[in-house]
Image (cartoon, rainbow, N blue to C red):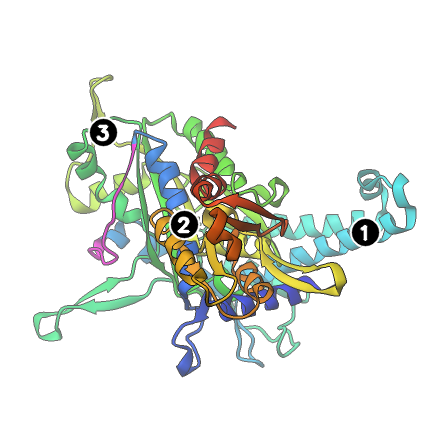
Amino acid sequence: MASQEDVFKKLIAHCKEYGFVFPSSEIYDGLSAVYDYGQNGVELKNNIKKYWWDSMVLLHENVVGIDAAIFMHPTTWKASGHVDAFNDPLIDNKDSKKRYRADVLIEDLMAKYDDKINKEIEKAAKKFGDAFDATLFAETNPRIQENKAKKEEIHTRFAKALNDGDLNELKQIIVDYDVVCPISGTKNWTDVRQFNLMFSTEMGSTADGAMKIYLRPETAQGIFVNYLNVQKTGRMKIPFGIAQIGKAFRNEIVARQFIFRMREFEQMEMQFFVRPGEEMKWFEHWKQFRLRWHKALGLGDHKYRFHDHDKLAHYANAATDIEFELPFGFKEIEGIHSRTDFDLGSHEKYSGKNIKYFDPELNQSYTPYVVETSIGLDRTFLSIMATAYCEETLEGNDTRVVLKLPPALAPIKVCIMPLVKKDGLPEKAREIMDNLKFEFKCSYDEKDSIGKRYRRQDAIGTPFCITIDHQTLEDNCVTIRHRDSMQQERVAIDSLETIVGKAVSMKKMLQSIVQD
Ligand code: GAP
């Protein structure tokens, strides 16, 4: 069986080969941790955006959207705390000259203990068969207990060091547990230093006195500085939310795992403004709503889990991640944060403007508290692609690669295929396509055998292929082939819109979030 690492490599190659994701400026050998989305990637991405946007803005009459500029007045980032506190602790290996995030080295170290524990359990499960009780075994096996205790010891020191901002202690953990550089294999480490992740550039010519500005590291601040504009012009009453999708930029020290950690990426964020004191209720509400949104994708409920933060960001009083099981383990794809009144309070202070909300029910002005949901679009894309990618062995030892994408998100919904390139079949096929294209993204393919054409569509996740044959000209029926089951059925051309429409409906997914 192929290892998860091999599967991941294949997925990256597949994304490139089939027009989903290309390395940025590839003809110049690429740019580290920057990627471009191709013709199929952009369709999938747009569909994910629509699913998110509609779940926020259509399903909630008290949530509206905005689209703020990437450039913002530089004081924004002073007020938000990013100039002073948006840092990662970095450490260099003096022999390999490679740079690492100290916290990631320690997280990897803890993950090794988890791996040891899991391997021990897997080994025993094989040995003891059906009667095996994994929980009891884990509770009583001395080696597992020892590894658990080691991990807990590291975890306690690590959480304290992060909370105290103690960089010396971070280094000490790395030294004490003999963490070596994966390249040089040595323990010759520098001290741990803080590194600010914001990119900066200059606005205006130097003669005018250029101003240092930042590329936004999160989209959220565009919402905070506009909250009163939206509240007043939209006559919004608390509680209400503002949603936004847009690019964010971070000079990540360790950029790796394909589109998981990028330097330019996209976020889908929503800030929900609430009365002070009610934030925990809303934090819980949005946690559950967001989890249902993920689960409605149908990738498997067991692939998600919450992970509460050990160290709260400078703005938060509660925070959790929604993690998804990727080929390299459970990883964060969304953060849900209770940001208190930190941001609005700080913008009020730095701008000198009154941005309090007048609550007509309480007859009182206050600075609202904020609960934020912040999901990475690229990470969601990766989680969907990684789960959808399947290599199947078929009858007669034939194989196929199929992307079992949620049909509502598939880049192309229908491929129209005349059996042969003559006898009026292409004309009939075009007629069908011209009718369906107003509703669904369609493609047309008349090259090669039908079998090869099916494989091409499987590889990009097209839910339906429609074949037009000579019989079609007589009975106005076509063969529709379903991607996952590969079943084929003969149906009337008139019924295509309904069959495809039902299967690729986003409405169904949205309804299941609300009904759950
Ligand atoms: N406004 C809050 C905020 O930005 P975050 O946890 O730093 O919170 C939210 O980021 C989400 O943005 C993450 O859960 C992740 O999905 C995505 N994200 C963050 N950094 C990223 C990166 N370098 N590459 C890709 N996605 C990233």
Within the image, what quadrant is residue 207 found in? Answer: bottom left
Distance (Cα) linking label 1 and label 2: 39 Å
> Looking at the image, which is closer to me, 359 or 426?
426
Whether the magenta-drawn stretch holds residue 64 is answered as yes
Mark 3 — residue? 236
| SS of the residue under disc 1 | helix
Q: Given the image, on which type of amino acid does mark 2 rest?
A: Asn
Within the image, what quadrant is residue 22 found in? Answer: bottom left
Farthest front residue in view: 474
> Looking at the image, which is closer to me, 192 or 289?
289
Structural crowding at the residue carrying mark 2, measured as other residues with C-alpha within 10 Å and reported as few (<14), some (14–19) or many (≥20)? some
Distance (Cα) linking label 3 and label 2: 28 Å
Farthest left residue in view: 208
Q: Is residue 309 visible?
A: no
Looking at the picture, does residue 516 appear above or below residue 133?
above
The disc at residue 47 is 2
Quadrant that contains the N terminus: bottom right
Q: Are marks 1 and 2 in contact (CB under 8 Å)?
A: no
Q: Is the shortest distance between ligand 1 and the CB of mark 3 under 8 Å?
A: no
Looking at the image, residue 106 sits to the left or right of residue 165; the answer is right
Q: Which residues are magenta?
A: 63-75
Mark 1 — residue? 122
